[in-house]
Amino acid sequence: MISLKNIFKKKPGQAAPEGKIEFFRKKYKKEQQKKISAQERKQRLKNYIERAGFEVNVQKLKRIFFNTAIIINLIFSALLIYYFSVTYGIGWGTVVASIFVLWVLIFVLLIIALWMMFYLAVDLKIFKRKVDIEDVLPDFLQLTASNINAGMTIDRALWYAVRPRFGVLAKEIETVAKETMSGVDLKLALEKFASRYDSTVLKRSVSMINEGVEAGGSIGDLLNRVSLDIQQQRAMFKEMSANVTTYVIFIVFATVVAAPFLFALSGILIQVVESLGSSLSGTASGAQSAGISISFSGVGVTQTDFKIFAIVSLLITSFFSAIMVATIKKGNVKAGVKYIPIFAIVSLVIYVIAQSLGAGLLSSFFTLS
């Protein structure tokens, strides 16, 4: 007779019911943590996009990037098939392997590149909004101080100081006013507004306003002093920027004028050496027929290779020069993004013009290839 003890005895490798419950509990907890982390990432991305003033659906944006990468890969795949089959007559095995590498590697790189470009555009937009807020902040504080001196409370004074010409700041103050009307404390609403932008001036101003409200002093006089300090700081920064104008002129001249001219001169020199080499080769052949052994080797750097080198060097130099000029003049690297295409285009145009003029002037002396 089989005992009940042997029936309910745990078999080897069989987990106890409590162990199974604990296993599923841990698994469920990990899944919940993953969901919460994904929601937090989506919310951070949404807040980051809202800081730039964009109203973009994150899911729709992901679909757009995914579809764009697919379309680009399809175009490259079609060109790859046509190029390999027509030009080299390569078999389908090599074509399929190349397309597989294209879809695995290039597709991922395209997605990463699209997201990097998007983040760069959003970051630059946020920086522009921050600059716009700092430009109109002193005038806004003065209007708010006038309203407070007229007998308004701080929240009403902020609301009635909004003007359309304040742009981004007007919209942000409207958001603060709506939050305070819904029951949010004014201090928390202002701190939330200041935390959205990486602006020391804005955060210091909001901090002084909150401290003044808590202390119960004369808020109007405080705001006037804050506005005056911001204006004095801006005037001091402009004076410092004017003192380094000489360095900016030197950098711009060396990048936009001197470097393209020297590269063009070097390219013309290569053309001259090639022309002289071809002329002297005929002389060497005549000397060899007379019993004299003379040989000339070809030019180590071709004209096409040097042009590629010159263009790439000018683009890299323009990029770093624009960053240096922005750091010296504006105090921030992001302000130099708008200078990059200007420096690059002007330097390339001067390079092409200098090379054409130099080749035309020397064509009367040498037969340039």
Image (cartoon, rainbow, N blue to C red):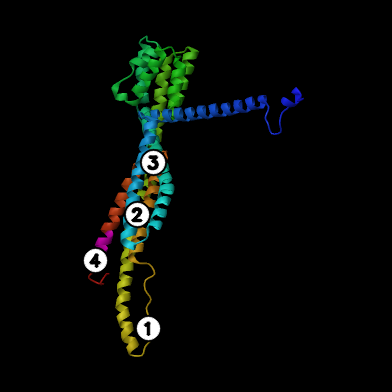
Residue, disc 4: 361
Residue type pointed to by label 3: Leu
Q: How many marks?
A: 4
Residue 308 lies in the magenta stretch = no
Secondary structure predominantly adopted by residues drawn in magenta: helix
Q: Quadrant of the image for the C terminus?
A: bottom left
Inspect this view and state whether residue 109 appears. Answer: yes
Residue depicted at 37% across the width and 35% down the height: 63
Residue depicted at 34% across the width and 87% down the height: 288
Query: Which element is circle 2 on?
Result: helix
Residue type pointed to by label 2: Leu
Choose mark 2 or mark 3, whichever is in front.
Answer: 2
Residue type pointed to by label 1: Ile
Residue, disc 1: 294
Residue type pointed to by label 4: Leu
Query: Which element is circle 1 on?
Result: loop
Choose mark 1 or mark 3, whichever is in front.
Answer: 3
Q: CA–CA distance between discs 4 and 3?
A: 46 Å
Q: Earlier in the sequence, mark 1 or mark 4?
A: 1
Above or below, 24 relative to 82: above
Q: Position of residue 356 (x, y in %)?
A: 25, 61
Residue depicted at 43% across the width and 31% down the height: 45
Residue 314, labelled with which disc?
Answer: none
Neighbor class of circle 2 (other Cα within 10 Å; few <14, some 14-19, many 20+) is: some
Q: Quadrant of the image for the N terminus?
A: top right
Identify the magenta region.
Answer: 354-360
Query: Which element is circle 4 on?
Result: helix
Q: Position of residue 70 (x, y in %)?
A: 36, 43
In the image, 66: left or right of 204?
Answer: left
Query: Which element is circle 3 on?
Result: helix
Residue, disc 3: 114
Residue, disc 2: 80
